[in-house]
Image (spheres, rainbow, N blue to C red):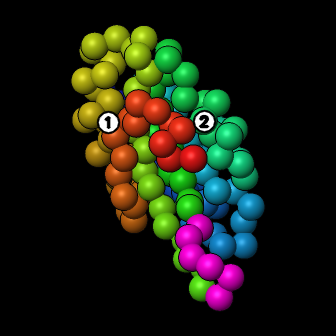
């Protein structure tokens, strides 16, 4: 069955992360059957990392704040996570399904699944 995406719900979650007035700094997009829907969201990176387990595949849109006290800027990343225990067929489908997520998430730097999250945080 072809994968679909709930564009309205995913766009609303995406906009929460992009909103400077929002405490939400990350959101995941997960699979509900053959539909990609918003998953968890939060204000701390540690809670995001806990979503990235070996048995799931998900997409995440994450905001990073850079700069100093005088000049702060927000940067965004689209992360594709494929756990080590995900089947080969699901791994392959994730690559093509990413195009659906990119229809919603339009400004990002894409990161392929980093082996060690500690390198980022």
In the rendered view, would you say 88 is above or below 92? above
Q: Can you see residue 12?
A: no
Return the residue at label 1. 97
Give how far across and how far down residue 96 sits, in percent. Answer: 25, 35
**Magenta-span inclusion, residue 105:** no
Q: Secondary structure at mark 2?
A: helix
Residue at x 42% of width, y 11% of height: 85
Say left or right for 32 vs 34: right
Asked whether 40 or 37 is in front, the reply is 40
The residue stretch that appears in magenta: 65-70
Say left or right for 14 vs 100: right
In the rendered view, would you say 77 is above or below 92? below
Asked whether 45 or 26 is in front, the reply is 45
The answer to whether the residues at label 1 and label 2 have Cβ atoms under 8 Å apart is no
Return the residue at label 2. 49
Give how far across and how far down residue 26 sits, in percent. Answer: 61, 51
Which label is found at residue 115? none
């Amino acid at each position: 069955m072809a994968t679909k995406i709930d564009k309205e719900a995913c766009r609303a979650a995406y906009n929460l992360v992009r909103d400077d007035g929002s405490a939400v700094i990350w959101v995941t997009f997960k699979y509900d059957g053959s539909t990609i829907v918003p998953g968890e969201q939060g204000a701390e990176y540690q809670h995001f990392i806990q979503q990235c387990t070996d048995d799931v595949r998900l997409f995440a849109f994450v905001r990073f704040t850079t700069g100093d006290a005088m000049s702060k800027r927000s940067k965004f990343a689209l992360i594709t996570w494929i756990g080590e225990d995900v089947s080969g067929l699901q791994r392959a489908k994730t690559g093509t399904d990413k195009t659906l997520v990119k229809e919603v998430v339009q400004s990002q730097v894409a990161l392929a699944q980093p082996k060690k999250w500690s390198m980022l945080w």
